[in-house]
Image (spheres, helix red, strand yellow):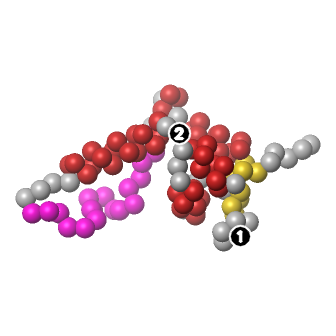
Amino acid sequence: MQEEPLMTPGQVALRLGISVSTIYSMSCRRRLPAIHLSAKALRFRRSEIEAWLAERSTATGAPVPHKSPLPSGKRRGRARKGGSNQTVDRLVEAVIKEVNNG
């Protein structure tokens, strides 16, 4: 039985349409299935990446995973005087939606 060739972070970044640094970040946080050969050497099994994508497909009716890095109700930085973060929230939601659909 022949093993499937492993993908590099650059190849996975091209497949997912995101940056290589995001690939490293996601794999270090265990949000992306990866083989850690050393602190900076990563490889990926194509089948695991494709399965990971399928799990996140909104076409299958699966909920879109979104986990805030901050505890509930907490926000980074200070709120602007008299302003709100609604614009920022809308932009973040749009980016998340585009990443998940792209």
Residue 95, horizontal then vertical, whole percent? 38, 45
Left or right placement of residue 71 versus residue 19 in this view: left
Q: Which residues lie in the magenta part?
A: 64-81
Residue 79 percent location from the top left of the image: 17, 63
> Is residue 23 visible to us here?
yes
**Residue drawn at point x = 42 percent, y = 48 percent:** 66
Amino acid under label 2? Arg
Give the side of residue 40 with respect to residue 73, left or right. Answer: right
Seen as rendered, the residue at the extreme left is 82
Secondary-structure class at tag 1? loop
In the rendered image, which residue does mark 1 sit on? 38
Does 20 appear above or below 101?
Answer: below
Element carrying mark 2: loop
Amino acid tagged 1: Ser
Residue 99: % across, % down: 46, 43
Find residue 20 and report its image quarter.
bottom right
Question: In the image, 2: left or right of 28?
Answer: right
Depth check, front residue: 18 or 31: 18
Q: Which dot, 1 or 2, sits closer to the camera?
A: 1
Q: Residue 93 location in percent, x, y? A: 33, 44
* Mark 1 or 2, nearer chain start: 1
For disc 2, the marked residue is 56
